[in-house]
Structures are given as C-alpha cells and as structure tokens.
Image: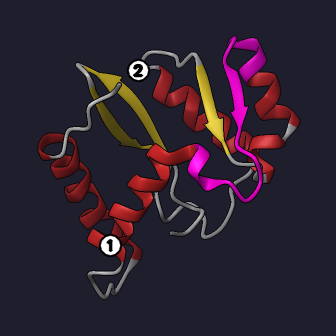
Amino acid sequence: MSRSMYYYAHKKDDRIIIDKLMDLSTQYYSIPATRLVQKIQEVLLHRAKPKRIRADNGSEFIAKVFKDFCSDQEIEIQYIQPGKPAQNAYIERFNRTFREDVLDAYLFESINQVNALAYEWQIDYNSNHPSEVG
C-alpha cells in the first residue's frame, strides 16, 4: 500500500476502530512531519489521546517536530525494528485487508474515486468487522 495512507486506530468497546488520518490526494509518497502532527492534532480534537504511537522509522516519524510533539503531549513513541513489520501487526493486517479489498480489487480512474470507495470500505470495516482487543 502507498505510504500516503495514514490511519489512526483506537480502542472502543473492545474493538479496534480505524479512522483515516490522511487523504490519499494529499501526497503520493511520504508526508512532512509537520503535516503529520497537524493531522494528529485534528484527530485529537475528537478522539482520546493515545498513550503511545507505534510507528516505523519513516522520515516523518523520526523528525524532531514529531518527537517534540509526542514529548509535549506525553505520548510514548514505540518504533518497530527495521525489517520487522510483524512488530506492527495490527496495522500490517489492516494494510493487507485494505489492499486486497480495495486497491487490488478495482481499477480506479481518479484519486476521488479511490477516496470515495475507501470511505465506504472504512464504514463497512468498522461496522461489520470488529476486531477484539486482547
């Protein structure tokens, strides 16, 4: 899946709920850390602050602005080891499911079409595919 897909997963009633954090049309590759922090701040207006964020070692997650934001918010950053995607198993499973159900299943004519279908899929995923949190 493209690195331009960013999601916020949170626990609600013993389920994992996935919210889209970044729109596909914002960037096609990695995003600047300042943009990532802005989007997280927007999510935190409506969602509880996480105790920790698990992330890969992408440039947006190792940037000083992201680290400072997490420190100021008292959010622990847990980096996965390079080459060990299983350490971020929830999002890797989600990425695979999204890729198989949406990205590999359709031929898209525009980014808007991808976003519309991704939104419909997100609603279905959150309503009909609850994941138990252990």
Q: How far separated are the C-alphas under marks 2 and 1?
A: 28 Å
Please state the horizontal and vertical placement of residue 127, each as a whole percent of the image. Answer: 14, 41
Q: Does residue 124 appear left or right of residue 105 in this picture?
A: left
Amino acid type at circle 2 is: Arg
Query: Where is residue 54 shown, x and y percent of the image?
Result: 62, 35
In contact (CB < 8 Å): disc 2 and disc 1: no
> In this image, 75 relative to 57: left or right?
left
Q: In this view, does 75 lie above or below 93?
A: above
Give the mark count. 2
Magenta residue check for 62: no
**Pick the front one: 69 or 1:** 1
Q: Which mark is residue 47?
A: 2
Q: Where is residue 67 in the image (x, y as percent from the top left)?
A: 80, 29
Q: Given the current orientation, which residue lies at the most extreme left position?
A: 128
The one nearer the camera, 37 or 53, is: 53
Magenta includes 86?
A: yes
**The quarter of the displayed image where residue 38 is located:** top right
Range of the magenta residues? 70-87
Q: Is residue 23 placed above or below 44 in the rendered structure?
A: below
47 in relation to 120, above or below? above
Identify the residue at horizontal 22%, vertical 58% (top origin).
Answer: 121
**In which quadrant of the rendered view does residue 34 lie?**
top right
Task: In this rendered view, identify the residue nearer to me: 31 or 106.
Answer: 106
Q: Residue at x 42, y 36 (%)?
A: 9
What secondary structure is found at the residue carrying circle 2?
Answer: loop
Label 1: which secondary element = helix
Q: At 51% across and 29% down in the image, what residue appears? A: 42
Pick whichever of labels 2 and 1 is earlier in the sequence. Answer: 2
Judging by the rendered image, the residue that carries numbered circle 1 is: 100
